[in-house]
Image (spheres, coloured by chain):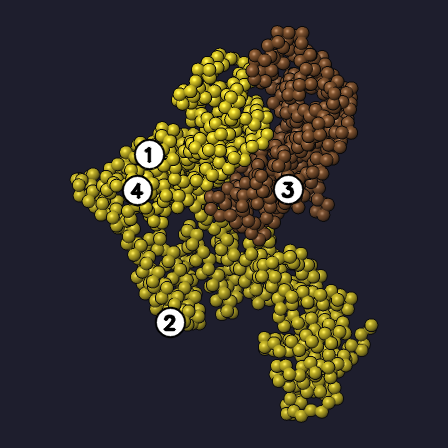
Chain colours: A brown, B yellow
Amino acid sequence: MEAGLKNKYGPWVIGEDFFNRDTEVRQLTELIDDGNNILVVAPRRVGKTSLIREAFRRMEERNQDYLLFVDVQHCCTPEDVIIATSLVACPYQALKDKIFDVFSSFWKQFRENVGSIGSGELLEIKFREGLGSDWQAKGQKILGNLAQADRPIAICFDELPVMLTRLLSCSKETEYEPKRNSTDVFLTWLRHLMGEHQDKLRFIVCGSIGLEPILKRHGLSHTLTQLRAFPLEPWSRETAEACLNALALRYNLKWANEAQRSLLDHLGSYIPHHVQMFFGHLNEDCRRRSSNLLSLEDVKRVYQTSMLSTRGHAELADYEERLLRVLDRDSVTLALDLLTETAVAGALEPQTARLLAQSLLLKNSDAVLREVLDILQHDGYLEWDEHKQAWVFVSFLVKDWWKKRFSQSYVLPQERR
Amino acid sequence: MALPRLIKHNPVFLSEEELASSFAVRQAELNLLLDIIRENTGSVNQHVIIIGPRGMGKTMLVLRLALAVRQDESLSRSWHPLTLPEEIYDVANEGEVWLRVLERIAVQEREAGRDYNRWLQSYESLRGEREEQKLKVKALAALSEFAGERNTKLLVIIENLQMVLGEQSGSDAAWDLRHTLLNNSGIMIIATATTRFKEIMNAERANFELFREITLTPLSTEDCRVLWCLIAGEDLVNDRIRPMEVLTGGSPRLLAILANFAAGKSLTELMDDLVVLIDDHTTYFKANMEALPSLERRVFVTLAELWEPAEARQVARRCRLDVNKTSALLKRLVEKGAVVETGKVGRKNLYQVAERLYNIYHLMRLSGIEADRVRALVRFMIPMYGQERVAHALAAEACRHEGEHRKAWIDGYREILADLKVKEQKQEIKILNDQAAEAFKKGDFQSAINQLDTLLSRFGDNDDPTLRKAIARALFNKGHTLESLDRHEEAITVYDDIARRFGEADDSALRKQVAHALFNKGVTLGELERAEEAIAVYDELILRFGEADDRALREGVARGFFNKGVDLEELGRIEEAITVYDELIRRFSEVDDSALRERVACALCKKSLALEKLGRGEEEIAVHDDLLRRFAATSDPAVRKAVACTLNLRAWSVYAKEDNSMVDQAILDAKKAIEIYPQDAYRHTLASLLALASRWGDAFDQARLFANDDLLLSQSPDDIIDFFIYAASSGKAEEALRAIKGTKAESAMEPLVVALKIAAGKTFRAPQEVVEVAKDIVKRIEERARMLESKPD
């Protein structure tokens, strides 16, 4: 095995590519073992999916549980979720039989012919056909059967909040109420199952956007109240330093004086994805120059030319889009203004925030402002700085992206009439 | 060795050997990609997207990558590369992507002479599947089957991903693809995309974050040289390859075109065939331009017309758009790689089309005038062949034509000659200026003036824009030299001449000269005690340049304000001076520029002194506090001087008021001032405060230092005397004598020494006139002692 750490960012990582977080893995595992249903709460790119996958991987080695990691981001309906869960369970023979039992009367022919189909992917089609429109009953039966397995099962629904926004999205106002009702039904059904099969089925929910703001926005907070929050913070500075050293070791690079410190100072918040991405750009830059030394000047240059460039704009668009998912149009405008003011001025003072809210002539501007600020803090954009008595960006990188993008066209609050 | 076959637009036509031999640059990117593939051994793969404008070498790179994987013993066991065609316009969702991959497998198996029918039949059968979800699942199933049988993973190369998943499919497709890529370790994607921002954004941020991005930047000078050498067989050294780099903007495709075109051709052939070159690539140029949104295209075309680097303001004026909007559009074009920033004028960026051949294309295609086509030819050839050779070629060409057709060639020839002449003149001016500078440095001011007068008499009336800057500079140098000879009136006349000649210029270098001339005139008038006139000159300076963005001009304005304030104080118009300092502070206090921050700090300092003169102590303290609040933490040496000065002033005001309650803080201030900017005037302040605090030992330690300071002795002898008077009046005459002994003050201030001896009851010997002065000092000591006794504790 090569020494050091692979420079990998974007997809989730486990095993030797998973860095640090042993404490969090242990804590999460203990909570699962104790029978808790968990909501992993963290901003995007902090490593939620990797954490859960790594915890599952280590639990797999104990041979005491069945671990089902269900990625539901592509799901648009409850049926999709049930099918996805069933597919993930199939590799376990004990669970596969339990699932097939549910469809046995519909599939009589299919079961006998399963060997002739070849690839397991085709099961998806057959599951969909078998589920029909009766997802609640069949779904309940599937999960009920799984709860009878010889071992407890941990089921992670990754990107459930994204799935819910897709479920709730509509092009016409008239479609909204039925969709909201469907979502309510689905979540209530899920909550019921969580309660019914406690200790046998343990659920973990996580997503790149916050679940609570979505539920709150759509009046669905009552549906999933029993989840225990498990917050996941960005890395500490020490962990980020250790990661950078491990990366440099792998790629045979050396940190010159102050270069590593400067990199971390630029980031401000040590979100694993950002740390890896920054290193990746630096590595690429070194290769182009046929150098193995990472200098302070290189860090500054790469920050400006790569981190804040078009890549930064795409990342930023993602931050913008997240807001669109959880806020209505007026609130999004306010949120963008608040973030831009924070980026341009360095901090957002309460009176300035109020001024911005008032300048948009919103109804109940105070209430809207409170809601928006809650979400901006919850989703990791801003945090309260006691010393400055103002809100500041959590990540300097996001602040710099934002400032670069929006500052030119921004009108100061005191100049608005 | 035969030069590699050049396929400019379709490298896929190259054989494997040709591909390997023609891959000369981008080695670092290739190695990086191979490393990423090697590291994909886990449950989920790192996917990659290669970003670059057209012609940057994306296709070449990915084809070379596929070849490298096939040829690598270890990688070829684990990975099976499949390259989709560059244009797949009939793909609208994820399932169709995998279907095309399946088709590719069938084609590859057939080409390899293996059994391909199975895969072809699977492909044909799936083409009839109408349901998207089923198509996706079944196509993936077939791919899994293929990979499973070969015990390999699939390396799928998809070009123009933004077209496939951005323009041609809906947003849900991106989520589906993400799900597949995150949950299927048997597939790795290497995608390419242009830098067209909109398409990348529409390709879903969810997927974009999934991909590791590698950006293909323009080729470096060295890479241009390598590529040129490979194609043209000619090794161009720096000064000859650099124009090619500039002309093509470092685009490998355009460089390859030029190299192939220019290699082995004579000048005349080049002239004839340039039209053909531009015509051949019109489709490429047109496609890129038409792909731009309309407003961006308008700005781009305007920039192409301008040829020379231009500010946003110039572009805006020419294409009749708002400046801010134009600026934003230019930034977008920069991000796309179509335009580059080539430098700054003051704080303003200069922009130029990234691939200079666009300028030539634009000029030749869109102008109906033959003269413009000749101009385009000239501009194209000069970087390669130099002006003289091109001039000869134009002359020869003119001789081949008759009548009207000759005119354009002659005009081109004349333009080059004129350009060459200007270059000669510039050279001559430089020599004269350098000689003048040399004479000035040696202190031979008259010789310097003579050189400058020679320069001005020969070139002073020349209107050529490129020479005007040099002339303005020579005039300024003359004015400055005249001042050194104390010929101030003549210097003022010269400065007036600069303002008259160049006062209306737009060029920023000329504007700076005018600003400097006005400022120097103001200073000279001040030295001649013509403060009113000096103030009028500063007012003119501020009026002309007060709104300028250029850093140097702003500094000139700040200095103008400052000097105006000083002159107003000289005239006793303190209130007005304070107003002027306030204006300086208001204008420049938020600016992040070291020189301007220094001016602000000095203005605050001067303002506090002015307030002290007016007896407005509270406001004076407030100004001190303001300065320290703003600048206490600065590391800028010039600003720190002002901070030290303010600390000293603040400390001194405590001593002046004899405010015992504040003396400890004042001592700290004085110490801090010395720490920041050690000078003996501050030690005097510290000594005085220590004395006020009755810390006489420490006070005399400081006194020993400042009593040796020449500047203090010559400029502030009363301050020194005052300290020792205070010491003596406090009963410390003997200690004072010990402190002053051996210092320069002892010999320079004999009356003071005698007075201290008298106060200490010691014998002395001195001339009568010294004793008389000493007695006056003794009176002051006694008076001070009485004052101290009468002070309440």
Task: Decide: few, some or many residues near mark 4? Use Cα within 10 Å; few <14, some 14-19, many ≥20.
Answer: some
Are labels 2 and 1 on one chain? yes
What x and y, as percent, mark residue A3? 58, 42
Q: Amino acid at mark 2?
A: Gln
Q: Which residue is mark 4?
A: B233
**Badge nearest the viewer, 4 or 2:** 4
**Chain identifier of the residue bearing label 1 in the image:** B
**Badge nearest the viewer, 4 or 3:** 4
Q: Write the residue at 42% across / 55% down.
A: B510
Q: Amino acid at mark 3?
A: Tyr
Task: Decide: few, some or many residues near mark 1? Use Cα within 10 Å; few <14, some 14-19, many ≥20.
Answer: some
Front one among B370 and B560: B370
Front one among B489 and B222: B222
- Asked where in the image residue B574 lies, by quadrant, the reply is bottom right
Residue B6: mark: 1
Is residue B563 something one can see in this rendering?
Answer: yes
- Asked where in the image residue A67 lies, by quadrant, the reply is top right
Q: Amino acid at mark 1?
A: Leu
- Asked where in the image residue B269 lies, by quadrant, the reply is top left
**Chain identifier of the residue bearing label 3 in the image:** A
Q: Write the residue at 41% across / 44% down.
A: B220
What x and y, as percent, mark residue A316? 58, 35
Q: Which residue is mark 3?
A: A270
